[in-house]
Image (spheres, grey):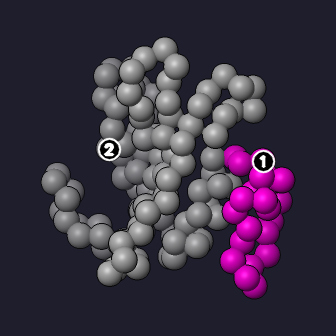
Amino acid sequence: MVSVDGEYNFTGFISRNKAFQENFSVGLVYDPKEEKGKICLFRCNGLHGETIGVPHHSFFHIHTVRADDINNGIKIEKHIQETKEYSTIEDAIQFYIRHINILPADRKKHFPPPSGQLELEF
């Protein structure tokens, strides 16, 4: 993906555990032109088990990295926020594409809402 002004490049990802459908992640990765490496800026996660440093995610949650962290050399999305915005991967994808501001025409083309859901314009 490219920003509207053409200055910034991003990659999106969607992953889901085959055995545990509630364990998923939908995210946005920034690929800076001026330096090596990539930075995951934002990801919508489902329910998953314990991770190092985080006891247990028994709720749907969002991970983010903040500008001040990046400026201080911390390039991991360590900020975790519980959310009620989604409860399925399909809903998480719709939340994600609105949150990262995908153009409405591109949303309809590449990420149509699941059958039976209305798409709201923002």
Q: Which image quadrant for residue 117? A: bottom right
Q: Quadrant of the N terminus?
A: top right
Residue corresponding to mark 2? 78
Left or right position of 14 against 19 = right
Span colored in magenta: 101-122
Under mark 2, the amino acid is Lys
Q: Position of residue 122 (x, y in %)?
A: 80, 55
Residue at 55% x, 66% y is 92
Magenta span has 115? yes
Q: Which image quadrant for residue 51? A: bottom left
Structural distance between the alpha carbons of marks 2 and 1: 28 Å
Q: Give the crowd class for mark 2: few <14, some 14-19, many >=20 residues within 10 Å.
A: some
Element at badge 1? Answer: loop
Residue at 49% x, 14% y is 34
Is residue 121 at all visible to an observer of this figure? Answer: yes
Magenta span has 24? no
Disc 2 vs disc 1: Cβ atoms closer than 8 Å?
no
Sequence-wise first label, 2 or 1? 2
- Assign the magenta stretch its main secondary structure: loop
The residue most toward the top is 34
Q: Position of residue 56 (x, y in %)?
A: 22, 67
Residue at 52% x, 19% y is 33
In the depicted structure, whether residue 118 falls above or below residue 106: below
Under mark 1, the amino acid is Leu
Residue at 58% x, 73% y is 90
In the depicted structure, whether residue 79 falls above or below residue 57: above
Question: Residue 86 has which mark?
Answer: none
Q: Give the crowd class for mark 1: few <14, some 14-19, many >=20 residues within 10 Å.
A: some
Residue corresponding to mark 1? 103
Along the viewing direction, whichever of 36 and 73 lies nearer the viewer: 36
